[in-house]
Image: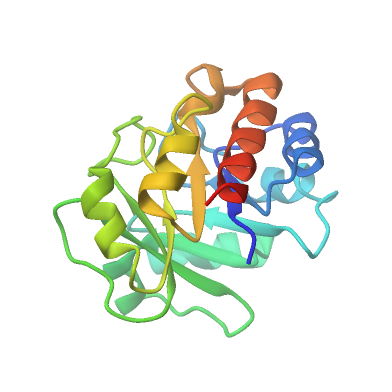
Amino acid sequence: MSLLVKICGLRDKRHVAVAMDAGAGALGFVFAESSRQIGPRTARTVSDIVPRSVKRVAVMRHPSSDEWRAVLEQFEPDVLQTDAEDFDYLEVPDSVACWPVYREGGAHPNGTETYLYEGPNSGQGETVNWSTAAEIAQHGQMILAGGLCPKNVAGAVQAVRPFGVDVSSGVESTPGEKDPELIREFIAAALAAEKVL
């Protein structure tokens, strides 16, 4: 199974194309309040070049049922990513995969699901404790997030051995503005690190 690389916080079709061409397996579109926030209709337009083989992820945090319904109907994501407890009240159709977010210091996953593991606050570049993450990664399919960038992602892959890695601020030139070269460097470094495990 090859490492899943997710580029998150995309808002521009050019950056979507760069990420796909470089080998990203998942693309995140942020609907939560953030410098990377995008509207569901715009996200659909930006991602209309994405093939079925690449997952289009709706990234939310404590959305209301109405907010989620609007994203579901207008964007039609492949995956919903939001905090684990949000799935207790959201209605998610079988056609959409669920990626719960578990945060450092909080509850841990206990099943075989695919999930995100990151710091207390999304999109802030907060690196988690990799040794703790490595223990948690033995359960289910962890996508490691938080503070990753082209310079440290190889070390993270080797230390944690996650199912996937996720980056947002680590491939930006300024907050919310993706850098095509950093996207390419991140994906290349992540995939190269997996080959030497």
Q: Residue at x 43, y 76 (%)?
A: 113
Q: Quadrant of residue 18?
A: top right
Residue 166, horizontal then vertical, whole percent: 50, 45
For this orientation, the residue located farthest to the bottom is 94
Q: Residue at x 65, y 67 (%)?
A: 78
Q: Is residue 54 left or right of residue 71?
A: right
- What x and y, as percent, mark residue 20? 77, 44
Residue at 28%, 54% in the rendered image: 133
Relative image position of residue 181 (x, y in whole percent): 69, 20
Q: Quadrant of the N terminus?
A: bottom right
Q: Nearer the viewer, residue 33 or 8?
A: 8
Residue 171's place in the image compared with 28, above or below, is above
Task: Tell me how the rendering is colored.
Answer: rainbow
Front residue of 95/27: it is: 27
- Using the rendered image of the protein, determine whether residue 96 is visible from the camera's viewpoint: yes
Percent position of residue 152, x then y:
44, 29
**Residue 81, placed above or below residue 121:** below
> Where 134 sits versus 98, above or below?
above
